[in-house]
Image (cartoon, rainbow, N blue to C red):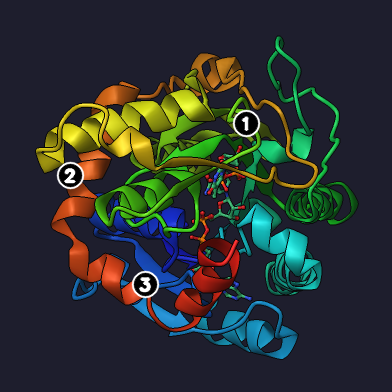
Amino acid sequence: MNKIIITGGAGFIGSHVVRRFVTTYPDYEIINLDKLTYAGNLANLQDIEARPNYRFVKGDITDAGFIDNLFATEQPDAIIHLAAESHVDRSISNPIEFVLTNVVGTVNLLNAARKYWEGAYDKHRFYHVSTDEVYGALGDTGMFTEETSYDPHSPYSASKASSDHFVRAYHDTYGLDIVISNCSNNYGSHHFPEKLIPLAIHNIKNNKSVPVYGKGENVRDWLWVVDHARAIDVIFHQAASGQTYNIGGHNEWKNIDLIQLLCSIMDRKLGRPEGESAKLITYVKDRAGHDLRYAIDATKLKHDLGWEPSLQFEEGLEKTVDWYLANEDWLASVTSGNYQQYYEEQYVKR
Ligand code: NAD
Ligand code: TYD
């Protein structure tokens, strides 16, 4: 399975997955298929774009004709599907975009795979990258396992849950070789600054308020994006057809505790007196339907395939802050244009 289409490869996680496959497997041919929405940025892949085993194709997964044609001309062996609308707040203001890309786009890819791989499903793989948010919200205790029932609450998680169901349906109905992974919140370099960690770094650096939704008591389980990309590599190559794996960092943080930690790292990095950046913390109106807590039990992945997270969170957060402080051009480019308009509407005027 050497010729792989990776969708959403210009985005945050996708760019790390593309980088991992292009650099780890020089004999593979990696095609990055991405529409380049506000969240897709080819600058994320500058370091590997000249490699002979990498190619970029601009295209929209909601365009069934385009996808059909791409499969016909490229004849890929496998697909690793990450392209999606990924931000919960955007899904609350504009759900239909999430239905189109996350549900219809995924079904377009499944249809092409079903058609072009017919008669040889055992030689091809459809890897669907999903989220722990499909499982809904936890109370103070418990963890999501692969057996937890789906209970999505936001339009984003509802669209991802729907796409997961379609992927399983194509396995059960047509026999397509599929694998699905459901991962917890990622952090690291190239993360678009509308999500909590990069937004907070960006705002602290620029002495702008850091919006904390509600009381800041919601809990997320954070995983370094490079560890996620490695998990995808392991699952892609080793998982049995039809399997699902949860991926997580065993690393739960209350939002407010995480932001306090980030503020103290930023104080140190920027030479500010301890406690200075924390003055920027501003409690704002809570997100509608805000899930209280996510926590992943990744025992199955460790037990079956030997994967474990490699990095302690404090170390990973420092690395992440260093990357953002050293890459001001990247931040400037993604905080202009369409994103700037959204940023003004969502954060500056609230
Ligand atoms: P992202 O928003 O950073 O990137 C999404 C990419 O998809 C962008 O490059 C965008 O241009 C592309 N894209 C969007 N619509 C498209 C379309 N119609 N056709 C082609 N390309 C399109 O997202 P991310 O955070 O990197 O997430 C990637 C995947 O991982 C998503 O499927 C998401 O649900 C999943 N996931 C994300 C997290 C997280 O913490 N960010 C956690 C678990 C799972
Ligand atoms: P986010 O990064 O949007 O990821 P997700 O909603 O997919 O978990 O948000 C992470 C947590 O941080 C979530 O509980 C919402 C909260 N949050 C804030 O408090 N302030 C913010 O400005 C943002 C973007 C998120």
- Residue 219 image position (x, y, % from top left): 59, 26
Mark 2 secondary-structure assignment:
helix
Kindly identify the residue that appears in the image at 72 percent across and 61 percent down.
91
| The quarter of the picture showing ligand 1 | bottom right
Q: Alpha carbon of mark 1 to alpha carbon of mark 3: how far?
A: 32 Å
Task: Judge depth for marks 1 and 3 and give the one in front.
Answer: 3
Q: What residue is disc 3 on? A: 334
For the residue pair 186 and 345, the one nearer the viewer reads as 345
Q: Which one is earlier in the sequence, the residue at label 1 or at label 2? A: 1
- Per the rendering, the mark at residue 322 is 2
In the image, what residue type sits under mark 2? Asp
**First-in-chain label (3 vs 2):** 2
Residue at (58% x, 71% y) in the render:
345
Which residue is outermost to the top? 141
For the residues carrying marks 1 and 2, which lies nearer the camera in this image?
A: 2
Disc 1 designates what residue? 245
Quadrant hosting residue 48: bottom left
Question: Residue 169: horizontal and vertical position, in percent?
Answer: 86, 51
Q: Can residue 295 be seen in this view?
A: yes
Quarter occupied by the C terminus = bottom right
The Cα atoms of the two marked residues, 1 and 2, are separated by 31 Å
Label 3 residue SS: helix
Q: Which is nearer the N-term, disc 1 or disc 3?
A: 1
**Number of residues whose C-alpha sits closer than 10 Å to that of mark 1, classed few (under 14), some (14–19) or many (20 or more):** many
